[in-house]
Image (spheres, grey):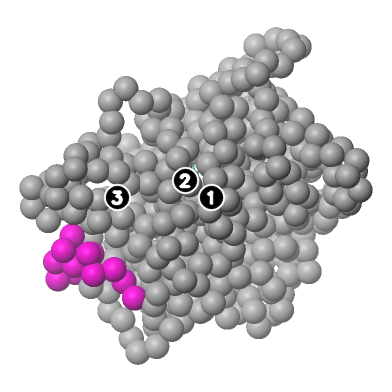
Amino acid sequence: MNAPTLDDVLSPPPGSAMWQPDFLFGAGTAAYQIEGAVAADGRLPCIWDTFAARPGAVRNGETAAVACDHYRLWQQDIDLAAGLGLDAYRLSISWSRVLREDGTPNPAGIDFYERVLDRLAHHGVKAFVTLYHWDLPQHIQDRGGWLNRDTGRRLADFADLASRRFGDRVATWATLNEPWCAAFLGHGSGLHAPGMADTRYAVEAMHHLLLGHGHAMAALRANGAQRVGLVTNVTAVSADSPSPADQHAVRLARACYNQWVMDPLLLGSYPEELQELWPGVRPIVHDGDMQVIASTMDFIGINYYFRANVRSDGAHGYTDKGLDRVERTLMGWEVYPAGLRDVLIGFKGRYPTLPPVYITENGMASDDVVADGRVDDAQRVRYLQRHLVAIDQALHAGVDVQGYFAWSLLDNFEWSEGYAKRFGLVHVDYATQARTPKDSALALKAFLERRRAQGVISGRSS
Ligand code: FCB
């Protein structure tokens, strides 16, 4: 193997809190994107099975029927994560694997996650569990899905079961992954399951997702969970010009991308700007809903990938015009690390009760190939490195960031993009299911080894 070059080195700035062992480094996955085995052991269909079967919904008609076959290869995958020296691993639990339609538990599905969690515990890797990473059981969709208020109660049932069965092995619980995507891409633009395309649906779905989050938090806490929160995706927003119209467009875009989720959780209200964007469209809010939604969280997970550069659309909206001549990833997403620093600092200013933050996803897609047993993904190493620097700047500005999770441990089923967009630290050959750690995985491993060695030298326990 070639000697590592400067591009292959990951290293937070000297003296950064990221060198301390209590700043967690991890990698994430989601059940639907890696498990495959969609009909095994009593697993029920979910909305992504249905959506992916719809012609044109997923690029090249690909499905997650096999994905990374993690349902069978889980042990080697967990061992791989532990072998990289990760402090923590973020996974999600497939709702339709663990709960039957009549609400009774499915023992085979529960066994699977018990094995995974036991293996993580065996390696001393902390489990960060997300309950809902977009894979709603189809039978719940058939009763209205997130357009039905009752679905929030069903999420709480799922949270209750999961925390009773797995609670002793879970470090943190996130109720939802990226409600923005579930609400907007799933119900407003139709790009994600269940494939609905009406802003009124998106607004209603968001309210029920957030309500479900509140109910699920209560269920988790009732079963003794100590660290409970939610994971949201955020977007950095800049103005295409200094014109007042474009500055206003920035406010509208921030309201939609970030505050639509963050404001109800941390301020107990939806941002007024949404009324300008979507006049007359409001969720049906019952008395007490906003209190449920705004229950205190122990942490918030922030997923950050890119920036939007917006201008006014001439009416009461914005368009993401993007910027020319900037670095982009295979997704077409701009690489803009400073945006992560800026959104974190902005949140600290806007939300007096901002809880501790984990960066629960950050990473990039490329079309990596294995050559001579190696995957040269220098762009990803630089991407991760530059985002660590941005987080360090946020730490210096007083934002309480406590951990960083690369997305993803493995190349996987990237939703409507199928398999071509490889986000993994570890390459997956879908024909053979061979795993090959990319240079980025090796760089992360090398950094974590250096950090441990340094901790030992300075007498700290790692
Ligand atoms: C996020 C999702 C995650 C993955 C990354 C690339 O929106 O949470 O599952 O697909 O994007």
Element assignment for label 1: helix
Q: Relative to 383, say whether 456 is above or below.
A: below
Residue ID for mark 3: 190
The residue drawn where x is 74% and y is 67% is: 166
Element assignment for label 3: loop
Q: Relative to 411, say whether 38 is above or below.
A: below
- Mark 3, ligand 1, within 8 Å: the answer is no
Residue 276 magenta-drawn?
A: yes
Camera-nearest label, 3 or 1: 1
Q: Is the Cβ of the residue at disc 1 closer than 8 Å to that at disc 2?
A: yes
Where does residue 352 sit, x and y in percent of width and height? 47, 71
The residue drawn where x is 51% and y is 67% is: 354
Residue 285 magenta-drawn?
A: no
Which label sits on residue 394? Answer: 1
Q: Which residues are magenta?
A: 269-281
Q: Relative to 337, say whether 266 is above or below.
A: below
Q: Give, as a three-letter code, the residue at label 1.
A: Ala
Gap in angstroms between the C-alphas marked 1 and 2: 8 Å
- Residue 163 occupies quadrant: bottom right
Element assignment for label 2: helix
- Residue 281 occupies quadrant: bottom left
Q: Is residue 462 left or right of residue 315?
A: right
First reached walking from the N terminus: tag 1 or tag 2 = 2
The residue drawn where x is 71% and y is 16% is: 4
